[in-house]
């Protein structure tokens, strides 16, 4: 089984989370700026659409951000609030 996947026309090794993260962020930027919008014309009617699931894209970015941080030794962990009493 190959570890390679295409993201935005770029072949990426999924075992390198920081590379995947970079391409996912590029995809989010392209979608957000309308770069992935397709236009179709039927006589005088024009239809514009994009096929993207922004929620899932954000979820993947979060997952690969954590994996990239872990790969670089940056374990963010969860912040805990401690209240000291006397």
Image (tube, helix red, strand yellow):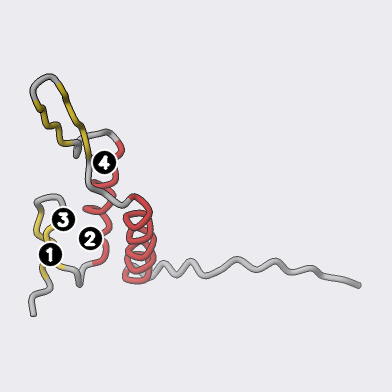
Residue 60 disc label: none
Please identify the quarter of the rendering in which residue 39 is found: top left
Of badges 1 and 2, the one in the foreground is: 1
Give the image location of residue 59, x and y in percent. Answer: 38, 60
Q: What label sits on residue 7 in the rendered view?
A: 3
Q: CA distance from mark 4 to mark 2?
A: 17 Å
Outermost residue on the bottom side: it is 1
82 sits to left or right of 1: right
Do labels 2 and 3 touch, CB within 8 Å?
Answer: yes
Residue 53 % position (x, y) = 31, 52
| Mark 4 touches mark 2? (CB < 8 Å) | no
Marks 2/3: CA–CA distance: 8 Å
| Residue that label 4 marks | 31
Q: Residue at x 82, y 70 (%)?
A: 84
Mark 4 and mark 2 lie on one chain; the one further toward the N terminus is: 2
Marked residue nearer the N-terminal end (2 or 3)? 3
Residue tagged by mark 2? 20
Q: Residue furthest top?
A: 44
Q: Image check: 57 left or right of 38?
A: right
Q: Secondary structure at mark 4?
A: helix
Mark 1 vs 2: CB contact within 8 A: yes
The residue positioned 20% from the left and 32% from the top of the image is 48
**In the rendering, at what x and y percent does residue 14 appear?**
19, 69
Q: Residue furthest right?
A: 86
Q: Nearer the viewer, mark 2 or mark 3?
A: 3
């Amino acid at each position: 089984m190959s570890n390679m996947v295409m993201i935005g026309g770029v072949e990426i090794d999924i075992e390198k989370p920081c590379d995947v993260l970079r391409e996912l962020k590029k995809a989010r930027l392209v979608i957000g700026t309308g770069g992935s919008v397709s236009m179709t014309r039927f006589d005088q009617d024009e239809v514009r659409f994009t096929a993207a699931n922004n929620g899932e894209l954000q979820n993947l970015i979060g997952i690969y951000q954590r994996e990239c941080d872990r790969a670089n030794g940056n374990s963010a962990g969860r912040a805990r609030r401690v209240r000291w009493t006397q």
